[in-house]
Image: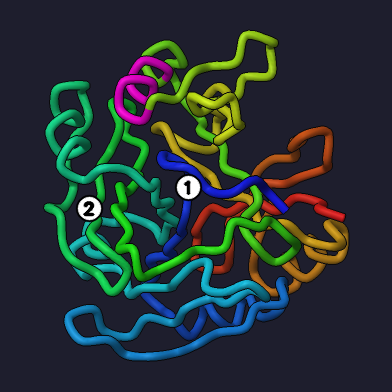
């Protein structure tokens, strides 16, 4: 189990897709998820992904204007922070606000892009909601920024979230207490702008890849996460997601 969660760590992931049922069917073949499928006021249908410890992610219908402009389905990570401070700082640091802050059942949030175009969300959680801090198979266990300008990305996230960059050559972002938050690498050929990729831990990477390819997914890249075998993939609708051997 990870140490207790601290501010400016990833606490949630959402998948935005034009076809929620297709997404649920696809991931049901790959990971052992339990799903609480409910329609919420002002949100619409929002299946919530449940782990042993509680809710960890959700699936939303992608807005039609994004579909119409050719934006593929995508995962968004949420970083716990002070919303007012983040809203003020992001434009000054070269990022852009994609949505204005809104209230959700778990707190207040907005979506933004960093200077390289990578999409992320800021989240100020209500005191009544607790997100599990464990990282086990079938949960999101890692996040990686693929950046075309590592120096610019380092400056942005240090100023916004207080993430320092490791000096040991591991290319990791650290919080002020020295705990690892994420890592960063260069921009590969399979993307055309900076992108955050979120990695699900799985008990058998080989079996997951086989199931993925049998159900319309494809491998974009093979990599390592903390010396563990991992892949970056596109799902059956084109959304990018990673899987890592976590046993």
Quadrant of the image for the C terminus?
Answer: bottom right
Residue 112 vs 205, above or below: the answer is above
Q: Is residue 100 above or below residue 211?
A: above
Q: Which residue is mark 2?
A: 110
155 within the magenta span: yes
Residue 121: x and y in percent read: 32, 49
Query: Is residue 131 in the magenta section?
Result: no
Q: Which residue is mark 1?
A: 10
Q: How is the image coloured?
A: rainbow
2 or 1: tag closer to the N-terminus: 1
Q: Position of residue 226 (x, y in %)?
A: 77, 34
Q: CA distance from mark 2 to mark 1?
A: 14 Å
Q: Quadrant for residue 92, please give it.
A: top left
Helix, strand or loop at mark 2: strand
Q: Residue at x 32, y 58 (%)?
A: 125
Q: In the image, what residue occupies the spot 66% across and 58% down?
A: 134
Please provide percent x and percent y for residue 231. 72, 46
Q: How many marks?
A: 2
In this view, 151 is above or below 100? above
Q: Residue at x 21, y 70 (%)?
A: 64
Where in the figure is residue 235, as x and y percent of width and height? 58, 63
Q: Start and end of the magenta stretch?
A: 154-161
Q: Please tell me in which quadrant of the rendered image residue 236 appears.
A: bottom right
């Amino acid at each position: 189990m990870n140490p207790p969660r601290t501010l400016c760590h990833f606490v949630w992931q959402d998948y935005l897709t034009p076809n929620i049922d297709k997404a649920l069917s696809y991931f049901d073949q790959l990971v052992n998820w339990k799903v609480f499928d409910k329609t919420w006021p002002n949100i619409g249908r929002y299946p919530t992904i449940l782990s042993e410890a509680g809710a960890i992610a959700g699936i939303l219908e992608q807005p039609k204007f994004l579909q119409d402009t050719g934006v593929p389905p995508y995962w968004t990570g949420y970083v716990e922070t002070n919303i007012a401070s983040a809203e003020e700082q992001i434009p000054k640091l070269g990022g852009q606000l994609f949505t204005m802050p809104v209230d959700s059942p778990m707190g207040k949030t907005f979506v933004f892009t960093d200077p390289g175009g990578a999409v992320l969300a800021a989240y100020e959680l209500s005191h009544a909601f607790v997100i599990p801090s464990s990282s086990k198979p079938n949960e999101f266990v890692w996040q990686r920024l693929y950046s075309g300008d590592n120096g610019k990305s380092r400056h942005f996230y240090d100023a916004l979230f207080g993430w320092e960059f490791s000096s040991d050559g591991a290319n990791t972002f650290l919080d002020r207490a020295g705990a690892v938050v994420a890592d960063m690498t260069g921009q590969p050929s399979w993307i055309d702008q900076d992108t955050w990729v979120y990695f699900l831990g799985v008990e058998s990477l080989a079996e997951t890849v086989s199931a993925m390819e049998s159900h319309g997914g494809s491998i974009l890249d093979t990599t390592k996460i903390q010396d563990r075998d991992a892949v970056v993939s596109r799902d059956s609708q084109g959304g990018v997601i990673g899987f890592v051997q976590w046993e």
